[in-house]
Image (cartoon, helix red, strand yellow):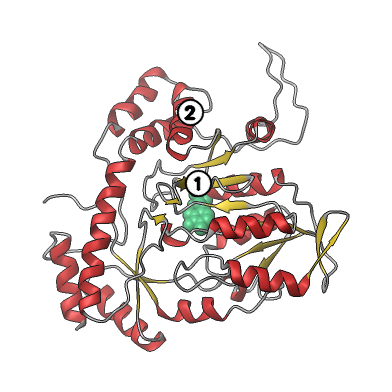
């Protein structure tokens, strides 16, 4: 059976031998041209036309009113958390099945992650679990939400669209509204993913994207903050660009700023990549169908988008029976140079977060034992 799977993946990627990575970038458009353009113009750093063009392209793709380019997705999250009003000592709800950066960004704001379980079909935050947990622990005082058992304010909620599959974000948004908890979406993995016709990352007060090397499109390192709020957008731009007051020659800063701006060199690469996003997503969605058919015929669940969702299928996922079968297959496939990967170790079990507040996380635990990501790159003819 494992042999058959490896054979099928090799055939699908037109790679009869040699290494098949999990996700590799494709520079098949204007990458070289735009990058050389920044070198020729000498504008490789924090000033340049590609940053503005990148921000315009991101607003066009996502439908967000404003997009602010930053150095990476973690910094985008840190800034979004600060702008959502999170203060030192607050709690921020997030999911245990995510990349460590989601929780790290909460800690960078001196707040504490508070873990709520995921749904087993979307692998993203569960509205049912969130509602149940808040009913048990939350209390509203002066219009603000507090955790009864710790006494801390619950200052934001950060769900994450796992592997690019949209979660039930409209239901999460409705619950957050009821409890007056600002919603910030970690859409780092879901550029090009929509739920009920709306781009992921645009359902809350702020959303964030990543353009890291392994994401659907990359600019080496990069991120973006999304918002429909003009004031927040202005603040985001100001704070991420050292909080310098605009002036022809004077150097005056009016706040403790951050140097989180995206260099023009990276923005050039990002623009070239974004031009190809829809083609990349189409290509990946086609691969998802091929995989789904194959794994269905083998009786192995392939995780697909839920109704109303259109996923970018960033990293494709199968669910094996249990941890033993998962580990057998991970060894077998990686030994044969077909790269596969388990889910991240659940964030709530990492040493830095093991004492953080949490609800019932049984679905995340069940999933974490079974998830295997399989090669998911955009396929090219060989
Ligand atoms: C990639 C990723 C990030 C962070 O992005 P970087 O650009 O690598 O800083 C944040 N959250 C999730 C869920 C991610 O997958």
| Residue 234 at x, y percent in the picture | 66, 30
Residue at image mark 2: 51
User: Residue at 56% across / 34% down in the picture?
Assistant: 261
Q: Is residue 127 visible?
A: yes
Q: Nearer the viewer, residue 225 or 334?
A: 225
Question: Mark 2: is the Cβ under 8 angstroms from ligand 1?
Answer: no
Mark 1 burial class by Cα count in 10 Å: few <14, some 14-19, many 20+: many
**Label 2: few (<14), some or many (≥20) within 10 Å?**
many
Vertical arrangement, residue 103 with respect to residue 319, above or below: above
Give the answer, above or below, for where 315 lies relative to 69: below
- Determine whether 199 is above or below 54 in the image: below
Location of residue 76 (image quadrant): top right
Q: Position of residue 80 (x, y in %)?
A: 64, 45
Residue that lies at the very extreme toward the top in this rendered image: 248
Q: Nearer the viewer, residue 315 or 212?
A: 315
Q: Is residue 26 visible?
A: no
The answer to whether residue 90 is left or right of residue 275 is: right
- Report the front residue among 148 and 353: 148
Between 178 and 288, the one lying in front of the other is 178
Q: Is the CB of mark 1 within 8 Å of ligand 1? A: no
* Residue hosting label 1: 209
- Indicate the quadrant where residue 177 lies: bottom right
Q: Nearer the viewer, mark 2 or mark 1?
A: 1
């Amino acid at each position: 059976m494992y042999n058959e799977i490896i054979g099928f993946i090799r055939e699908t990627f037109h790679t009869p031998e040699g290494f098949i990575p999990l996700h590799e970038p494709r520079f098949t458009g204007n990458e070289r041209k735009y990058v050389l353009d920044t070198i020729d113009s000498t504008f490789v750093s924090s000033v340049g036309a590609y940053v503005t063009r990148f921000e315009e392209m991101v607003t066009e793709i996502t439908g967000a009113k404003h997009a602010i380019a930053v150095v990476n997705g973690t910094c985008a999250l840190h800034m979004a958390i600060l702008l959502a009003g999170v203060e030192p000592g607050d709690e921020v709800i997030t999911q245990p099945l995510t990349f460590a950066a989601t929780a790290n960004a909460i800690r960078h704001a001196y707040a504490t992650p508070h873990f709520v379980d995921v749904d087993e079909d979307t692998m993203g935050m569960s509205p049912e679990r969130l509602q149940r947990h808040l009913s048990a622990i939350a209390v509203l005082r002066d219009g603000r939400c507090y955790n009864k058992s710790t006494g801390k304010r619950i200052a934001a909620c950060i769900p994450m669209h796992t592997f690019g599959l949209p979660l039930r974000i409209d239901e999460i948004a409705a619950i957050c509204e009821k409890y007056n908890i600002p919603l910030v979406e970690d859409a780092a993995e879901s550029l090009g993913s929509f739920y009920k016709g709306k781009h992921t990352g645009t359902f809350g007060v702020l959303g964030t994207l990543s353009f890291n090397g392994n994401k659907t499109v990359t600019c080496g390192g990069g991120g973006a903050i999304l918002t429909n709020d003009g004031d927040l957008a202005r603040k985001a731009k100001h704070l991420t660009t050292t909080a310098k007051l605009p002036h022809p020659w004077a150097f005056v800063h009016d706040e403790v700023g951050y140097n989180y701006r995206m260099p023009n060199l990276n923005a050039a690469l990002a623009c070239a990549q974004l031009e190809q996003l829809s083609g990349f997503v189409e290509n990946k969605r086609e691969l998802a169908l091929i995989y789904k058919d194959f794994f269905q015929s083998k009786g192995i669940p392939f995780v697909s988008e839920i109704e109303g969702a259109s996923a970018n299928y960033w990293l494709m996922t199968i669910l094996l029976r249990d941890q033993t079968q998962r580990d057998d297959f991970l060894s077998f496939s990686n030994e044969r140079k077909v790269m596969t990967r388990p889910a991240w170790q659940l964030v709530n079990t990492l040493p830095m977060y093991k004492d953080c507040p949490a609800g019932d996380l049984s679905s995340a635990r069940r999933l974490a034992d079974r998830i295997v990501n399989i090669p998911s790159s955009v396929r090219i003819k060989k």
